[in-house]
Image (spheres, coloured by chain):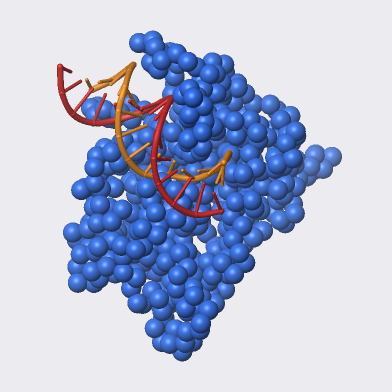
Chain colours: A blue, B orange, C red
Amino acid sequence: MNSCEKSKKNRGGSGAHEPTLAFCAAAVARGYGRGGGYDWLKWTSEHTIPATLLLYRHRVHEYPPGLMGPIIGMSPDKKAETPGLQEERMGLRGVCGGAGTLPEAECGAASPLATSLDRGSGGSEDEELTNLNWLHENLLQNFTLGTPGEAGGAQASASPLFDIEGDPGAPQNASSSSSSSTSPSQRDSLKSKPPLSFSLLIYMAIEHSPSKSLPVKDIYGWILQHFPYFSSAPTGWKNSVRHNLSLNKCFRKVERSLGKVNGKGSLWCVDPEYRPNLIQALKKQHFPAAHAFCTPPASPPSGSSPPSHLFLQDCSLKESDIDAATAMMLLNSAPGHHHANPCDSDGPLDLSRPDSVLVSCDPKQDHNYSSLALQRCSSRSSSSSSLSSLDDGGPSPGQVHPRARQRRAGSEGFHSDEDSDLGDRDERGGRARPAPRRSSPSSSSVRRPAGKRARREVIAKPELDEELKEAAGSLLHLAGIRTSMEINKRSAKSKKLNRK
DNA sequence: TGTCACTTAAACACTC
DNA sequence: GGAGTGTTTAAGTGAC
């Protein structure tokens, strides 16, 4: 068996760092019990579940869905959770707030203990005690974030970890958190491997920074600070972090030419295009921190920060909002469309542009391919019955285009330009490259002159763009929301009428 | 059994 | 030259 076959056999989703939702969002959403080194069962087995958490769960039906935020499902083929499970998750999301959004009044006004006692515990709930989703969600309450004085306030005080949103002076590290308010089990958890993927850790680190961009070193630092586990862990995790940064499209490299005199490497920021995905991932994980990342930073964003409009202002979107958000994403990610990306050096964003709003908690984005893939899918549409069309939310992880799948079989699968430029990449992606790696000393600079970011550039097809816009517009129309396009059209119409 | 979504390790190139 | 950084490949794990 040659290496090609071998890797094909073994690697499976080794292109896992697909920065698409599969990587960014699906990861956690699907639960910790999946793969890799993060075994939720293992993790939970190392921890004692606080009794209060067991009691909290009895409040599951007390919150209106709206407060819990949308139930964001994964793509149909993958995340088909049983209805009961969904309900459970939905309810659990109500536990101290969907994604940490519930204010204290909602969350803790009534004693959870009392409530739970009032309700008693049924047999079915006993069964639910073993629900990993529940464990996962509740344990993650330890990661409570949020605005001081709000939901996070009370919880954050008990949080063993951090207050991401919080001020720098706030106790954020393990040492400071091992206060009297921290239970032993919580302290233990600090020394355990966090049940978060590296991509989310990185995301949190970056989002925690005032400038929304960090050098690798600072990312290390943040992770070390908040997850002391890594301080004693083998240094391989740093490699994993770098690996993630490199491979995950969610993260973008920003040249630190401006202002930064010394220091190696670049700054890394979250690609706004994928930011909702990450947020969604956190939300799906019911990670209360998601809320922190759904709100604009307390401090005014710096020049390199994502514009505030990129933040989700309200994570408790209604379903219709979600559909609309999908369309907005489509609009924003259409080829040739202006990318509201703070990392782009193309120029400042026009914040006044209504259509630049990027907001989405949309499950429909939770497919495996970014807008680029969507473009591909729509342009190549077709042949595959499994290929999702735009109106059903695009390809899910299991519904990706066969070619995409093929690509993914290689670790470079997600490089979007494989078929647009750098024709040799297909061969490499297809493992058809028998030549030894790094054959040429200058190969690196030659092969990747502009890094992965350059490879993301896709030749825009205007007609496709229009199709996407139309499709998005239809979605918005169905959702009862006007797109900027529509608005523009209407305003143009009205202008015409006025002229007449 | 194959696929997927990861983690981990390692090799290598580049920059400081 | 060494350390840090960035990229890429390979392999392993566990759930679905």
Residue at position x 50%, y 84% from top?
A: A122
Residue A446: in sight, yes or no?
Answer: yes
Quick one: quadrant of the C terminus of chain A? top right
In the image: residue A1, left or right of residue A74: left
Report the residue that reaches farthest toward the bottom. Answer: A118
Horizontal relation, residue A472 to residue A49: left or right: right
Left or right of residue A151: residue A186: left
User: Looking at the image, which is closer to me, A6 or C6?
Assistant: A6
For the view shown, which residue lies furthest in the right direction? A500
Is A450 above or below relative to A237?
Answer: above
Image spot of residue A384 (x, y percent): 73, 36
The residue closer to the viewer here, A196 or A365, is A196
Seen at 25% across and 62% down, the residue is: A188
Q: Can residue A449 be seen in this view?
A: no
Image spot of residue A137 (x, y percent)? 43, 64
Counting labels gives 0
Question: Could you tell me residue A91's position as x and y percent?
Answer: 53, 71
- Which of A214 and A42 lies nearest the eye of the viewer? A42
Residue visible at 38% across and 15% down in the picture: A438
The image quadrant of residue A143 is: bottom left
| Image x and y of residue A279, in percent | 48, 51
In this image, A212 relative to A333: left or right?
left
The residue depicted at 37 percent of the width and 34 percent of the height is: A243
